[in-house]
């Protein structure tokens, strides 16, 4: 390590105030962190834990994003926790999700464990002390605090909350209007009566456009290439029917989850086995809203097979209704440059704009932009191999919650929650202070591959960050396989005495 960095880190550590020792330290108070706290509370009630969150409230994604219409793109029966029934409409607003999370926090007395405005800057593992030292800075006072913990539960999500991803286009500085990234949407942005161009056609664009369409002069969705969408009623029939029969909400939650997951498994399987048929069904859904004369081929027919990128659900087809009404339109073209009055396209057309919204995605951040050290050596995460996408070779006493792309994130947060609690109890039973995953003799010749198989799934934000992510192997133990339906049975059956786990 660079000597001056080492010295300044030591100095920082020395100047930090000791803030206590905990059995478990949870990073982040998003849906994963609050879920982790619930699992600890219910499955390991003797563990003392603390949750550090840089923002001044819980919610993570649902607190950061404040653009008009902000809502989930998957249903809340499966995005909600396994243990707490979701009783509202399946596609929910950020406010509804936060209110649900607030109930989980209050019902389980989690709030007293959360320390807001604490940004974690560094985490150092000592094999001698067999514990982590975590350096945090108070976002409000600048005070530096030093925590120690036996186990680190990383629930920091996967993208940098402070800023979104905006590509550099020529001429941006000349544009006379306002450029906004949805992740940092200004509180009082006056878009009423304005010409707005939204760059991008992912879930965020599909949310913002119908939310502002009525109030703007016109909004254009500008995309380089089309995306798949699933338009449909914002309701789940089986939940409605069970509710009409006055079935208990906990039963409705369980049955509706099973029905959704059954249907999704079927959809995923079909998108591999009969991609053309699935593609036609998806396009048919869009055509039903836009009519036979709309150029679906050009604007809504992606070149990739369905499910290679996340498919956004469009509740009640609101995006397509906005297009149909004439208040919104779609342009499929490439940006040549920004101009003082808008955007010049490669086709030679120019789009006039007062406001340009860059719905161009995230900056993935690996492990919360925290400087990790293992026994004094900086950790390069890309040199590790992942154990089922949640633990990493050479990184003791740590687990990361990384959800699914094709199914709701929280399904995995619950599975990882059960696994971590089982692992902590197993360590206690063995009297072990340290657990680390290690390649076994049978893994010695295993090829080490990038984090995800891009033939299977290839969203841009992951592609941009692949070189920073851990490696995967070619066996189920050494991959994050994105398959809830396999993992729901595999995780509870993980043999904690397998040679992949080294205890000391
Ligand atoms: C607009 C939007 C809509 C989405 N909709 C869906 C959906 O419908 N279904 C779905 O499955 N997924 C969806 N996702 C993906 C979504 O991010 C995850 O499903 C889920 O919310 C992630 O939860 P999390 O708690 O793991 O992480 P996050 O929500 O990202 O929360 C992480 C928390 O950790 C904190 N943190 C990070 N680093 C540090 C640090 N160094 N120190 C202290 N605190 C730190 C952050 O401030 C944040 O509060 C959506 C994402 C976005 C952006």
Image: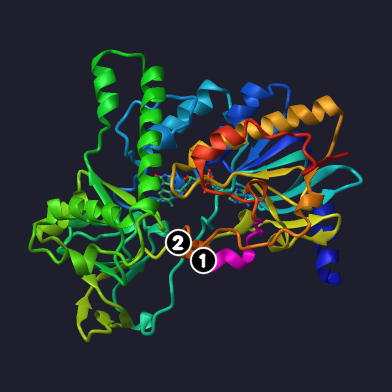
Residue numbers of the magenta segment? 463-473
Q: Residue at x 41, y 24 (%)?
A: 254
Image position of 22 with respect to 322: above or below: above
Task: Say if residue 64 shows up in the picture.
Answer: yes
Which residue lies under the disc numbered 2? 459
Residue 9 percent coordinates (x, y):
81, 60
Location of residue 370 with respect to 340 vertically, above or below: above
Q: What residue occupies the far right of the structure in this picture?
A: 128
Q: Is the C-beta separation of discs 2 and 1 under 8 Å?
A: yes
Rounded to the nearest angstrom, the CA distance separating label 2 from label 1 is 6 Å
Tell me the residue at 65%/28% (across/down).
40
Residue at (39%, 80%) from the top-left corner?
Answer: 169
> Does the magenta segment cover residue 451?
no
Q: Quadrant of the C terminus?
A: top right
* Along the viewing direction, whichever of 209 and 10 lies nearer the viewer: 209
Classed neighbour count for the residue bearing mark 1: other residues with Cα under 10 Å, few (<14), some (14–19), many (≥20)? some
In the foreground, 307 or 145: 307
Looking at the rendered image, the quarter that the N terminus falls into is: bottom right
Check the image and name the residue furthest to the bottom: 348
Can you identify the residue that label 1 sits on? 463
Residue 219, visible in the rendered structure: no
State which quadrant residue 10 falls in: bottom right
- On whether ligand 1 comes within 8 Å of the CB at mark 2, the answer is no
Give how far across and how far down residue 484 sits, in percent.
Answer: 50, 40
Query: For this view, does 193 lie left or right of residue 199?
Result: left
């Amino acid at each position: 390590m660079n000597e001056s960095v080492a010295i300044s880190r030591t100095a920082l550590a020395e100047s930090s105030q000791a803030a206590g020792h905990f059995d478990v330290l949870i990073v982040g108070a998003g849906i994963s962190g609050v879920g982790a706290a619930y699992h600890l509370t219910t499955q390991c009630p003797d563990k003392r834990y603390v949750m550090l969150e840089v923002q001044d409230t819980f919610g993570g994604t649902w607190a950061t994003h404040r653009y008009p219409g902000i809502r989930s793109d998957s249903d809340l029966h499966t995005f909600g926790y396994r243990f707490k029934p979701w009783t509202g409409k399946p596609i929910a607003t950020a406010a509804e999700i936060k209110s649900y999370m607030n109930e989980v926090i209050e019902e389980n007395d989690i709030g007293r464990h959360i320390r807001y405005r604490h940004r974690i800057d560094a985490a150092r593992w000592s094999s001698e002390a067999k514990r982590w030292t975590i350096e945090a800075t108070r976002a409000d006072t600048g005070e530096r605090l030093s925590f120690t913990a036996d186990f680190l539960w990383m629930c920091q999500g996967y993208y940098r909350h402070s800023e979104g991803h905006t590509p550099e286009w020529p001429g941006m500085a000349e544009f006379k209007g306002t450029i906004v990234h949805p992740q940092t949407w200004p509180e009082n942005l006056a878009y009423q009566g304005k010409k707005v161009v939204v760059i991008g056609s992912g879930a965020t664009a599909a949310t913002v456009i119908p939310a502002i369409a009525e109030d703007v002069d016109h909004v254009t969705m500008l995309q380089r290439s089309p995306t798949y969408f699933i338009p449909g009623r914002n309701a789940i029939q089986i939940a409605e029917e069970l509710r009409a029969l006055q079935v208990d909400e906990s039963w409705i939650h369980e049955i509706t989850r099973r029905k959704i997951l059954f249907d999704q498994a079927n959809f995923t399987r079909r998108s591999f086995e009969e991609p053309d048929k699935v593609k036609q069904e998806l396009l048919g859904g869009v055509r039903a809203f836009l009519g036979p004369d709309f150029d679906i081929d050009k604007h809504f027919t992606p070149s990739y097979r369905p499910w290679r990128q996340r498919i956004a659900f469009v509740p009640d087809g609101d995006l397509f209704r906005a297009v149909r009404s004439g208040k919104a339109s779609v342009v499929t073209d490439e940006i040549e440059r920004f101009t003082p009055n808008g955007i010049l396209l490669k086709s030679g057309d120019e789009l006039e704009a007062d406001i340009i919204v860059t719905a161009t995605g995230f900056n993935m951040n690996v492990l919360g932009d925290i400087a990790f050290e293992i026994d004094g050596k900086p950790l390069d995460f890309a040199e590790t191999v992942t154990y089922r996408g949640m633990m990493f070779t050479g990184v003791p006493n740590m687990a990361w919650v990384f959800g699914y792309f094709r199914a709701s994130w929280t399904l995995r947060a619950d599975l990882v929650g059960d696994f971590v609690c089982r692992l902590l109890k197993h360590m206690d039973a063995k009297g072990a202070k340290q657990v680390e995953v290690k390649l076994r003799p049978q893994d010695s010749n295993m090829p080490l591959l990038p984090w995800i198989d891009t033939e299977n799934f290839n969203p841009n934000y992951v592609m941009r960050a692949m070189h920073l992510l851990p490696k995967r192997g070619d066996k189920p133990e050494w991959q994050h396989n994105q398959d809830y339906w396999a993992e729901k049975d595999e995780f509870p059956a993980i043999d904690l005495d397998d040679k992949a786990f080294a205890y000391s």
